[in-house]
Image (spheres, helix red, strand yellow):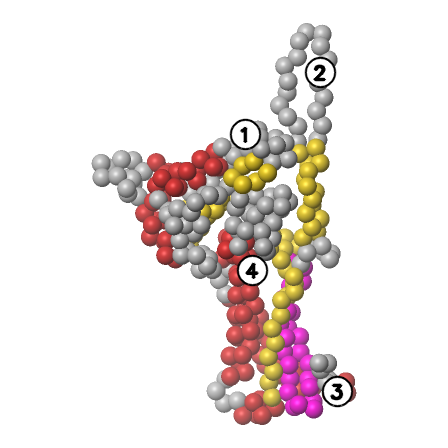
Amino acid sequence: MAQSVSVANTGAFSQLISRDYKKIFFDEFAKQPEEYRAVANVTTMDGAYEKTGEIIGLNALQKIGEGQPVPYDNFTQGNEKTIYPEDFGLAFAITENMYDDDKSGHMKKAFAELGKAAALTRELVFWDLFNSGFGTLKRAGIDSAALFASHPLVGGGSYSNYAASGSALSVTTLQSAYNVFEKMVNERSNPRPSKPRLLIVPPELRFEAETLLKSEYNPENAMKQVNTIGNKGVEFMVCHFLSSTTAWFLLTEKQEHDLRFINRKQLQLKQWDEPSKRLAVFQASMRFTTDFVNWYGTYGNAGA
C-alpha cells in the first residue's frame, strides 16, 4: 500500500528528531565490533553487477629433442560468474506523542538499536558464507560447486577442500586439514601448495583451539611429544556468528583467498513525515553482498 506523504510538510517533524538523534545512529553502528573484517576482502562495486571470467594458465615446459620444434600451449578460458548486490533495510516510526512525552530516552534507544541492527546485518550476511558453505542453495563458486566441496577442475579431475564426513577438532583432523593446503592443486592438477594461517572456531571450541595451537607438547600424547601442529604459524579466532557449535574452518592469508564483502552503497539513514498519522519514519538501508568466485585457500569441516 502506498504511503501517504504531505509534500508541503515533508521533513518538518522528522528533521526535528533527526537533528538530535541521527549522530547516535551512526556512532552506535561504528562502534560495534567487526569480526568479518578479520577475514573478508572488502571491495566496492560501481555497477548493477560484477562479472568474473576464469583464465587457466600454462602447463610446465616440455622436454624437446635437438632440432625439434618447441611445443605450444595456450591459455584456456574457464567458467564465468556474475555477482549481484543485495538490498537490506529496516525502519521504525516515532509519533508526535512519543516525541512530546519521551522522558525515558526511548527514542535515543531506538536510534541506537537501529545502528546495532545495521552492524549485525553485515556480520550475519558475511558469516553465512561459512554457515551455508557446504551447500549450493544460497551461492556457488565459478565452478558451480559449494565453497566447501569436491571441486571439478577445468583440466579434469577434482579436488576437495572439506571433510566429507564431519569430524571433531583434534590433532589428527587438524593435521589432515593442513595436508589439504600442502597438496592443493590448480585447474590443471599441478601442485599449488599454500599455507593455512587462520583457524576459525565457534565459542564452544575456543579452549580446544587454544590448547591445540598454543601448547608446547602434544595435548593428546602422554609422552610429552612435541606439539608439531602448534608451530606452523596458524592463529585462531572465535567467531560469534557461526550457526554450528562443532564446525571449524581454516583459511590462508586474506590476499590468498577469495572470500569477499562487496559494498555497493554505504549505510544511509533516510527520513520522512506522514502528517496524516502524526508520525516520522526513519529508515536504515545499505546495499552490499558477500560471495566468492574460487575456493582456493579455504577448508571447511562440518564438525562432529
Give the extent of the magenta segment.
Answer: 263-285
Q: Tag 1: residue type?
A: Pro
Q: Between disc 2 and disc 4, whose residue precedes? A: 2
Q: Between disc 1 and disc 2, whose residue precedes? A: 2
Label 2, secondary structure: give it. loop
Residue 172: quarter of image: top left
* Location of mark 2 (residue): 70
* Location of mark 1 (residue): 191
Residue 231: quarter of image: top left
* Eye-nearest disc, 2 or 3: 2
Pinpoint residue 145: horizontal percent, then vertical percent: 59, 45
Q: Which mark is residue 6?
A: 3
* Location of mark 4 (residue): 125
Pinpoint residue 236: horizontal percent, then vertical percent: 41, 49
Q: Tell me the distance, in whole angstroms, between the alpha carbons under discs 1 and 2.
A: 24 Å
Evaluate if marks 2 and 3 touch, with contact meaning CB atoms under 8 Å apart: no
